Image (tube, rainbow, N blue to C red):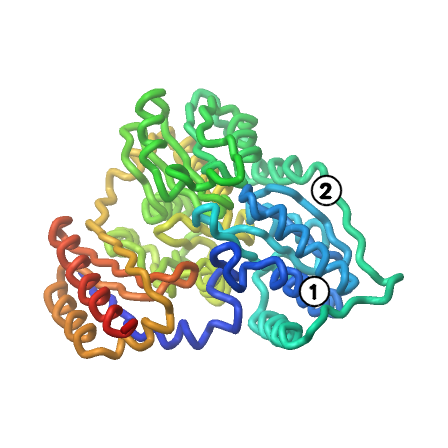
């Protein structure tokens, strides 16, 4: 197997981060700066000033089902209004739905109050620019500069009284999004006769996802669709798949689909209860796109450093180009745009089908996999017969990015990395990187043997933990 070098220092990722913004907006523990009402108030003002002054349009706000979302929704609304920006309130809705409605409502920006797959005690803000696209680096920089200025001030500026922004509710936001999702499914196909277990993660998809699949004809068994503000992602959804596996087997369903808290990522389960991650879904989609003539010699698939090497090999064997990008759907999307390609994604289930939607969307990605299966009358298990993923073990070691910048330079860490890379040469890969969404360093090892992958990953994780204690002291 081709080895991908680890990136212990992750200098490039650190350089690409702009003050306050990680790879997926701003995220953290509720009540711990910057995830506080006063900061979010200032963020609303900064976004309102930067984006409204540039485009003179309203701002859209969506959220997932976290209890703290009510508080931050009010803070954002107040900050935006003080900046003179009008606001369209969507309520609980998947992140990609907010991006879609930012576009269709012709808004200048979209804000999503969510911490994605994290537990309820975390929250954050994801930001979209004009037409629902990711903010540019220049826009992020301008917002960051204004935030720094506001933090240094004793009070929040505001527009003249007659210039304060107004807010309105979009009561049919869910319905608009459901119809858009359904429009991406081939008109001549349906899901009649297919039974699907849908795990909504007690999150933002709890209304939209069951409606989409049932209205296309599927028999839908819905689980984890009773959000109470604190149960989002709790032992459910795409990051805790066991309950979906059990439900698929219990109901003898054809397959299962799980979303994370804000429904921008998806995982699947076949009728045998086996998990199908983003790599498996990309394989199904790539073959379908190729058969449909959408992947010519000049097109291919964009994955990430975490994409399974077996996926890369399987696609290359079928003359489908495959390139790796840094982890983060924004980087995958940027590379797709540079190459003029349509299909890409991450192992974790952030999938991009740019011929269907310009946004990473868990529901729409799931629909495209289903369309590939229905068009050939295949089960999910049958569609994956020719893909044997290499055993892959991922360990998250709690660390701050600043700690990792120091640890990555230590001789003990570098030596451990070198030794593991030497053993993996020709039979596996090591990827080592700080997360852009959580205070952890991810240690990922692929090996032809599951047990050895686990041993090597834990070996390196122990070295990093020990080194972290040295730094902390």
* Front residue of 103 and 373: 103
Q: Earlier in the sequence, mark 1 or mark 2?
A: 1
User: Residue at point 12% right, 49% down?
Assistant: 451
**Rendered position, 170 above or below 342:** above
Question: Spatial distance from mark 1 to mark 2, Cα to Cα?
Answer: 22 Å
* Front residue of 19 and 343: 19
User: Residue at point 41% right, 74% down?
Assistant: 14
Where's the C terminus, which quadrant? bottom left
User: Residue at point 61% right, 49% down?
Assistant: 98
* Residue 174: percent from left, percent from top: 63, 37
User: Residue at point 27% right, 65% down?
Assistant: 432
Residue 132 position by quadrant: bottom right
**Rendered position, 246 above or below 443:** above
Look at mark 2 in the image and give the residue it sits on: 170
* Residue 52: percent from left, percent from top: 74, 65
Does residue 318 appear left or right of residue 97 in this picture? left
Look at mark 1 in the image and give the residue it sits on: 45
The answer to whether residue 87 of the structure is visible from this angle is yes
Q: Residues within 10 Å of mark 2 (few under 14, many from 20)?
A: few
The answer to whether residue 354 of the structure is visible from this angle is no
Does residue 47 appear left or right of residue 372 in this picture? right
**Rendered position, 405 above or below 302:** below
């Amino acid at each position: 197997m081709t080895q991908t070098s680890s990136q212990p220092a992750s200098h490039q990722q650190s350089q690409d981060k702009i003050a306050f913004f990680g790879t997926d907006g701003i995220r953290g523990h509720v009540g711990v700066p910057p995830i506080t009402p006063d900061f979010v108030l200032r963020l609303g003002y900064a976004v309102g000033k930067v984006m409204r002054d540039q485009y003179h349009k309203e701002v859209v706000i969506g959220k997932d089902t976290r209890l703290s979302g009510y508080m931050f929704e009010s803070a954002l609304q107040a900050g935006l209004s003080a900046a003179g920006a009008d606001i369209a309130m969507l309520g609980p809705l998947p992140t990609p739905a907010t991006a879609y409605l930012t576009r269709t409502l012709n808004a200048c920006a979209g804000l999503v109050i969510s911490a994605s797959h994290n537990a309820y005690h975390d929250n954050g803000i994801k930001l979209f620019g004009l037409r629902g696209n990711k903010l540019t680096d220049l826009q992020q920089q301008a917002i960051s500069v204004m935030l720094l200025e506001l933090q240094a001030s004793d009070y929040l500026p505001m527009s003249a009284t007659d210039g304060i922004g107004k807010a309105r509710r979009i009561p049919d936001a869910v319905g608009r999004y459901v119809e858009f999702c359904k429009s991406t499914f081939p008109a001549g196909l349906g899901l009649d006769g297919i039974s699907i277990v849908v795990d909504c993660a007690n999150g933002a998809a709890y209304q939209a996802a069951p409606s989409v699949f049932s209205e296309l004809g599927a028999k839908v068994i819905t689980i984890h669709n009773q959000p109470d503000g604190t149960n989002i992602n709790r032992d459910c959804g795409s990051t805790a798949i066991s309950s979906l596996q059990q439900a698929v087997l219990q109901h003898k369903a054809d397959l299962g689909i799980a979303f994370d808290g804000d429904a921008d990522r998806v995982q699947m389960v076949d009728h045998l209860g086996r998990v199908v991650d983003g790599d498996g879904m990309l394989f199904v989609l790539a073959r379908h796109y190729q058969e449909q003539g959408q992947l010519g010699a000049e097109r291919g698939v964009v994955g990430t450093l975490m994409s399974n090497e077996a996926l890369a090999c399987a696609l290359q064997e079928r003359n489908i180009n495959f390139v790796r990008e840094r982890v983060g759907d924004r980087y995958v999307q940027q590379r797709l745009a540079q190459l003029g390609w349509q299909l890409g994604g991450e192992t974790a289930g952030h999938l991009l089908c740019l011929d269907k939607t310009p946004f990473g969307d868990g529901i729409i990605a799931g629909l495209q996999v289903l369309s590939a299966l229905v068009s050939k009358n295949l089960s999910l298990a049958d569609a994956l017969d020719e893909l044997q993923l290499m055993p892959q073990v991922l360990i998250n070691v709690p660390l701050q990015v600043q700690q990792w910048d120091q640890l990555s330079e230590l001789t003990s860490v570098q030596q451990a990395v070198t030794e593991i890379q030497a053993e993996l040469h020709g039979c596996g890969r090591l990827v080592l990187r700080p997360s852009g969404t959580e205070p952890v360093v991810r240690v990922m090892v692929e090996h032809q043997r599951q047990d050895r992958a686990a041993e090597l990953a834990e070996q390196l994780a122990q070295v990093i933990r020990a080194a972290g204690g040295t730094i902390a002291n």
